[in-house]
Image (cartoon, helix red, strand yellow):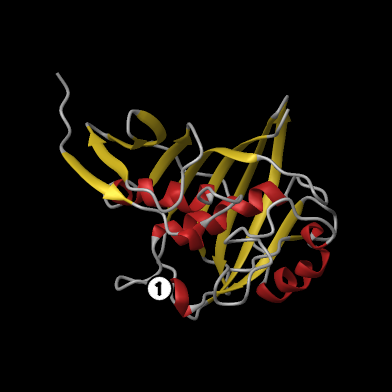
């Protein structure tokens, strides 16, 4: 019989919402993956159901997996994977920042309150607005890391997961279009530092019915890869 090695309580603050009333998918992916990332560099997170805000949820370690549940309802599950993720090509910060002017969310945003890509006040939301680059294969944005997301040990995996999440969606979305994150695989290579300047890059890698696939990366100004992700989104019927 399998028993829980560790059980804790996790509550998602209202600030870290994606769509109204539920957690940002990348943020909650990072939260559930965080304990595994200490031992493993790559973690696959599957979102089974939307995660409610301001609710005490059960975070439980079962063998090599971590699960988040609301009562008996499984919300999120994370497992370590032996995989090196491919990353979109590096884009210099100045070029990434210029691409923000072509952010399609300015023409229509399904989730304007999103912590990452929503039109929130500076310092409250991250305001990462990925826009297309010449050629159209990549989307990119500049990220100046605000001190309002820093914890005692630096910038947590929740924030990095959130940043890597939304940009994979905007690699697909037109104005007003949306989907919900279904799976996010995270690989962290280096720490992110408060006040640092980074390029965030994403690309669409395919579509299968309602499933949208994408990859993303965070780079330092010299092109050093900091973190990478691959995502699966589920578009509405």
The residue lying at 39 percent from left, 63 percent from top is 156
Q: Is mark 1 on a helix, strand or loop?
A: loop
The residue lying at 55 percent from left, 59 percent from top is 163
- Which one is nearer the viewer's eye here, 216 or 9? 9
The residue lying at 36 percent from left, 53 percent from top is 11
The residue lying at 20 percent from left, 42 percent from top is 7
Q: In this view, does 63 lie above or below 178?
A: above
Q: Could one spot residue 160 in this view of the protein?
A: yes
- Which one is nearer the viewer's eye here, 129 or 178? 178
The quarter of the picture where residue 92 lies is bottom right
Q: Could one spot residue 89 in this view of the protein?
A: no
Disc 1 target residue? 150
Q: Where is residue 84 in the image (x, y as percent from the top left)?
A: 46, 43
Q: Is residue 76 above or below residue 14?
A: above
The N terminus: image quadrant: top left
- Which one is nearer the viewer's eye here, 88 or 147? 147
Residue 87 lies left or right of residue 37; in this view the side is right
Q: Position of residue 78 (x, y in %)?
A: 38, 37
The C terminus: image quadrant: top right
Crowding at dot 1, Cα within 10 Å, few <14 / some 14-19 / many 20+, comes out as: some
């Amino acid at each position: 019989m399998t028993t829980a090695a560790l059980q804790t309580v996790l509550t998602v603050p209202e600030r870290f919402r994606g769509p109204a009333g539920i957690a940002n998918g990348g943020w909650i992916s990072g939260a559930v993956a965080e304990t595994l990332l200490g031992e493993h560099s790559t973690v696959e997170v599957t979102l089974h159901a939307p995660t409610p805000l301001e609710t005490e949820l059960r975070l439980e370690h079962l063998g090599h997996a971590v699960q988040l549940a609301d009562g008996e309802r499984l919300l999120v599950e994370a497992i370590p994977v032996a995989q090196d993720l491919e990353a979109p090509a590096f884009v210099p910060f100045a070029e990434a920042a210029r691409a923000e002017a072509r952010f399609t969310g300015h023409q229509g945003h399904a989730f304007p309150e999103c912590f990452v890509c929503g039109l929130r006040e500076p310092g409250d939301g991250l305001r990462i607005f990925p826009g297309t680059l010449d050629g159209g294969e990549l989307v990119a944005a500049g990220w100046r890391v605000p001190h309002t997301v820093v914890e005692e040990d630096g910038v947590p995996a929740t924030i990095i997961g959130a940043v890597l999440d939304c940009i994979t969606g905007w690699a697909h979305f037109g104005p007003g279009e949306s989907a919900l994150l279904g799976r996010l695989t995270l690989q962290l290579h280096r720490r992110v530092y408060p006040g640092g300047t980074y390029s965030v890059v994403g690309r669409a890698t395919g579509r299968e019915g309602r499933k949208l696939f994408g990859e993303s990366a965070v780079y330092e100004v010299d092109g050093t890869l900091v973190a990478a992700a691959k995502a699966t989104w589920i578009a509405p019927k």
